Amino acid sequence: MQSVKQVLSGEMLGMPVDVRGWIYRIRSSGSIIFAIVRDSTGIIQVTVKKGAVPEHDFEAVASSGIESSVTVEGTLAEDKRAPGGYEVRATGFTVVGPSEPFPITEYQSTELLLDKRHLWIRSREQTAVMKIKDSLLRGARNWFHENDYVEVTPPIITGVSAEDSTTLFKLKYFDRFAYLSQSAQFYLESLIYSCERVWALTPSFRAEKSRTPRHLTEFWHLEMEAAWVDNEGNMKVQEELLSAMLRSATDERAAELKHLGRDPAALSKISPPFERMSYSEAMDELQKKGCEVSWGSDLGAVEERELTKDKEQPVFVVNYPKELKPFYMKENPDDARTYKNSDLLAPEGYGEIIGGSERETDNALLIERLRDVGENMENYQWYLDLRKYGSVPHSGFGLGLERTVTWVCKLEHIRDAIPFPRTIARVYP
Ligand code: NSS
């Protein structure tokens, strides 16, 4: 048995080959049938001539529809008109699992494709996205391993709000309530006192009530936390990690990137250091571009798009006003109105993919800020303990995996960066 990719390498020209997969396209001209068969590695043309295969095989192919699973035996031949330049001339063709008429045809509404998501994920675009995501993740895992980070497993059920308490999913937990995690950050912070450098990949949940092309209610969160690292060091980790992830994707998935319209060569040029721009500079630039913003305005999708649409490399925006960010960030000693934090914005208008900061180590300040936002202090006692027993300067960040995939794969909507997107409107399939 060979994969389609192996067959398309041409090494077996003139020799017998065996492939198995699913019918991708099929057309018949009486005594000859052209079937395009796909497997996980690619597509190949198979010609089935009446008389060249047993009669019942020919009839089975002739009556089978797209998405039937099949096994093919035949000889490999060159054919310039076939995708990939080769075809298999069948000597045997078995339909293993016939397919009913496939409900997805060429032009379908977005809604139908989402209703039939369990079938639509077979498409070549979706397959390419999943493979690129796989390589990005491997790049990250290797980078963390090479740099002495420990992969840890934080909880998903939690009693605290790590980000915005208005987007918590509340769940009944026996005789009380708990939440689905928005971020593993506080647990990662607890783990640096022994492991020093930790990372985790977990699902994060946000009850985002708005429908936007960059919000999911469930996304995969790649987070890291490290002792003895300041905000500048934190940004260095981000730019190195992201560059390693991109290298992994361009090395392993150049064909898939091209299929999605992304030039792997351009992507592989992205390397540290990334540009750094203060929030104040970002505001000046936006005002010059005619945006109606003033110091203190949040950067939303529109503003981030303006800042990055003409850029080819990601850019850090640093030192946001405190009002725009959560309580746990470290005050900026050079401007107490702001935090020592950064958002990393992807180029070409894609915007924020990572949020990170140095963490506040002063418990008095943390308590004051928690009170200001009306949090129940009881839930945060354990978090405050971390500053009582051998506190250290430390920093960390969270990379939104689907935001990153949306950019890398040049997608229009984040739902295509995950096989089963969860949004306010959808938990099916
Ligand atoms: O809210 S973040 O900006 N920051 C945190 O959660 C920190 N506690 C992470 C940390 O320091 N350990 O979210 C981080 C990233 C953000 O930049 C996005 O890329 C992504 O998580 N993110 C999302 N992706 C998809 N959908 C939604 N709703 C979403 N929210 C954040």
Image: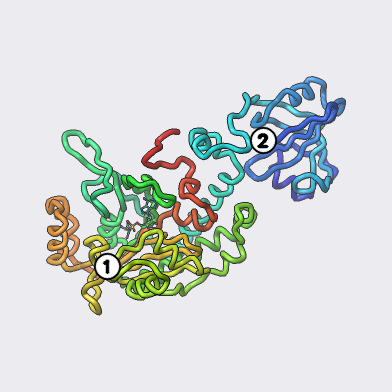
Q: Give the CA distance from mark 2 to mark 1.
A: 56 Å
**Label 1 sits on residue:** 296
Residue at x 12% of width, y 66% of height: 364
Residue 251: which quarter of the image?
Answer: bottom right
Q: Is residue 130 above or below residue 336?
A: above
Specify whether 9 is left or right of 52.
left
Locate residue 226, reporting x and y percent. Answer: 32, 65
Q: Residue furthest bottom?
A: 334
User: Callout 2 environment at 10 Å: few (<14), some (14 to 19), or many (20+)?
Assistant: many
Residue at x 63% of width, y 26% of height: 101
For the C terminus, the quadrant is: top left
Q: Is residue 289 visible?
A: yes
The label on residue 87 is none
Q: Is residue 49 above or below residue 287?
A: above
User: Callout 1 environment at 10 Å: few (<14), some (14 to 19), or many (20+)?
Assistant: some
Nearer to the camera, 56 or 2 = 56
Say what amino acid the circle numbered 2 marks: Gly
**Label 2 sits on residue:** 21
Specify whether 374 is left or right of 269.
left
Locate residue 335, reporting x and y percent. Answer: 24, 77
Locate residue 2, reporting x and y percent. Answer: 71, 41
Of badges 2 and 1, nearer the viewer stands 1
Dot 2: what SS?
strand
Q: Is residue 362 above or below residue 96?
A: below
Precedes in sequence: disc 2 or disc 1: 2
Say what amino acid the circle numbered 1 marks: Gly
Locate residue 411, reporting x and y percent. Answer: 52, 52
Residue at x 25% of width, y 65% of height: 329
